[in-house]
Amino acid sequence: MKAKNLYDKLWESHVVRKEEDGTTLLYIDRHLVHEVTSPQAFEGLRLAGRKPWRVDSVLAVADHNVPTLGREGGIQDPVSRLQVETLDANCSDFGIEEFRMDDARQGIVHVVGPEQGATLPGMTVVCGDSHTSTHGAFAALAFGIGTSEVEHVLATQCLLSKKSKSMLIRVEGELGMGVTAKDVALYIIGTIGTAGGTGHAIEFAGSAIRSLSMEGRMTLCNMAIEAGARAGMVAVDEKTIDYFRGRPFAPKGEFWDAACRDWNTLKSDEGAHFDATVEIDAKDIRPQVTWGTSPEMVVPVSGAVPDPSACADPVKRQGMEKALQYMGLTANQKIAEIPVDKVFIGSCTNSRIEDLRAAAKVAKGRHVAKSVKLAMVVPGSGLVKRQAEQEGLDKIFLEAGFEWREPGCSMCLAMNDDRLSPGERCASTSNRNFEGRQGPGGRTHLVSPALAAAAAVAGRFVDPEELS
Amino acid sequence: MKAFTHLDGLVVPLDRPNVDTDAIIPKQFLKSIRRSGFGPNLFDEWRYLDHGEPGMDNSKRPLNPDFVLNQPRFKGAQILLARENFGCGSSREHAPWALEDYGIRAIIAPSFADIFYNNCFKNGLLPIRLEAGIVDRLFGETASVEGYRLVVDLENQTVGLPSGGKIPFEVDAFRKKCLIEGLDDIGLTLIHKDEIRAYEAKRKLEAPWLFDGRNL
C-alpha cells in the first residue's frame, strides 16, 4: 500500500465525491461559528429557505466584539452589541448550541473548541476565521473559510475544495532555554516567508515539535496561516490522546477506546511523500521579536532592525522601507533598545493556561515599568481564567501591575474597546503585526508570553533570562 | 452571484507586496451584519486622512491625495494590479465584498493568499495569477500610459494588452464554470445530497464519536 502522509489520510477520509478537475465535496465534522463572519451566512440561509444540515456539528461563541471589562453592563458600542445579539438570535432560531457572554465556557473560539473536546483528532474543522489552523495541533484537518463557505457548510455539511500540496516542516533537536512554540512559529515564518506555505497544508514534525505541549502545538499551528498555509497539523501521540480524556464533547467508554485506536493511525507513514520539505535545527531558534508590519519581518531579541539597503529585491526593499517608516524605527537599531508603551498578553495564539503561567513566572515579584501605560492579560476563555485564578496567577499579575481581564479576542484585532492609540508601540503575544491591526497607527511587535511580560517589566524588549 | 465573462477595464496599480485583508477593509467595518456597502471603506486607512468609523458620511472625509485610488486618472478602475501575496491574513469575506462594491471585478497579481483567492470566486470577482515579470511589466505600462486598459476574457483565459497581445492565465475548470454562469454553489452541492447522506451513514458506523460525542 502506498505510504500516505497525515494530510492525505485526513483528506481522503472526508471525500464525499470528486469532480474530474479535482474539485472535491469534502465532509465537515465540526463547524465553529463566531459573530463577525456568520450574520450574512445565516441571512443567506433564510433568504433561500434553507436549514442547517446538522446542527449538532455547530458550536457558536461570541469572541471578537466582547468587552474585557465591565461585562455585567453589557456591550456599550451599539454596533458591536447588534452583532453579538444577531449571533444569539441566529443560534436560538436555528437550534445551535452557543456559549453566551455570561457563560463560564465563553472565550476565543479556537481556545474553546479544543477545551470542550469539540475538536477531536481526525476531524475536519472549519470556522469563518483564518486561525482555525490552530485545531490542526490535534491531527485534525482544520482551516479558515469565508462567509459564503460558512453558509455552504451550514446548508450542506460540505465544502467544495481542492486538495492542497503538502509540506513537511521538521524541527529536530532540543529547544534552547526560554525558546517557546511562539518563537518556533515566528522563526519558521521568518525562514519560509508569509507566502512560503501558500497552496500547502503543513505538517510540523521532528523531536522539537514532539517535545511541545498541546498548548504549544496549538500556538504553532495557529500561525501556519501567517506562513500562508490554510492548515497546519501535528501527528497524534500520547499527549494528544491524554488531552481529550474527560473533555465534555469527547467520547466515553467503549467509544473512547475505539476512538483511541483510530486516532493512533493519524500520523504520516514511513516514507510518505511531501511536495516540499523544510528542515530546521532547533538550536538555531532564539527568542524572537518582529520589527515590521508582516510576521516574516522578525529577528532574535538579541538582534537589530535590518537595513533595507542591504536587500537586493526592489519590491521587498520598498516593503521594508514602508514598514520601518510605519513602525518609527531605523535600520540597525538594536531590538533591546526599543521602548514599549503597552503590553498585550492574550489572543488565540497565546492565551492558554501554559501561556499565562509562562508570563506569570516572569512577572512574579517584579513590577510593570513606569513608562508602560498599560499591560493587560486577557485569558483565552472563562475556564482558562478560572484555572489561572485557582493557581493564583491573577494575583501575581495584579501585584505586578498588570490588568486582569475577561476572555475574548481583545487587542489582537481591536474590535472591542481594547486598542492602541496612533503611534503607540505594543509588545503583543498575538499573531499579526499588520498596519493598524491593534488600532489605527498602532505599532505591534509579536513576541512570546514570557517576552511580553519581560517587556512590561523592563519597559523595552529584553530576553527574560537577562532580567535581574 | 454576478456572472463574469468578459471585462474591458481601466487598470489601477497598488504597488506593495503582502497587502493584507486588514488593509483592504479595517476591522471596525466588520461589525456590519450586511453583505453590501463596504466600497466607500475599501483601503480606508490609506484612502482617507482621518480615522474612519461605521456610520460616518464618507463623502465628507478628507481624502489622501497620494493614495492611488484617489488619483483622477484611475477613477472608475475595474482591474486592480497588485503585488505578491495579495489578500493575506484574515479570512474576512468583507475584503472581496469591499472590492466588488467599489467596482473592482478582476485582480491581477503574481500570487494570492489561499482564503482570499477562494473568497473572490464566491463574489463574482476574478483573481488572475500572472508571472512576477509580466506583472512588473504591467506596472510599468500602467504608470507610463494614461488610461491604460486591459481586456480579461475568462472563456479563453487570456488578458488582452492594448498592443493586441494576449497573456494566458490558469483557472480551475469548476470555478471558471461557476463564474461564467453565475452559479450558486449551495444549489450545486445539494444536487448530491444523497451522496452526502450515504457518506454520513458510512462514517457513523466507522467513527460514531464524530457525531455528537457528548451523547455517546
Image (spheres, helix red, strand yellow):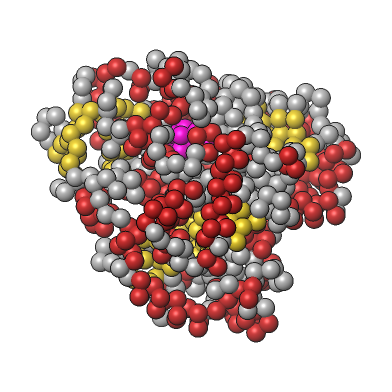
Q: Considering depth in this image, is A347 or B84 the residue closer to the camera?
A: A347
Q: Is residue B133 left or right of residue A264?
A: left
Q: Is residue B172 left or right of residue A128?
A: left
Q: Quadrant of the N terminus of chain A?
A: bottom left
**Magenta span of residues:** B19-27
Q: Is residue B38 above or below residue A202?
A: above
Residue A450: where, in percent of width, then height?
Answer: 74, 43
Residue at 30% x, 55% y: name it.
B184
Residue A105: where, in percent of width, then height?
Answer: 70, 57
Residue at 73% x, 39% y: name it.
A73
Q: Considering depth in this image, is A284 or A231 the residue closer to the camera?
A: A231
Residue A243: where, in percent of width, then height?
Answer: 69, 67
Residue at 28% x, 38% y: name it.
B106
Q: Quadrant of residue A20?
A: bottom left
Residue A310: where, in percent of width, then height?
Answer: 48, 27
Q: Quadrant of residue A15?
A: bottom left
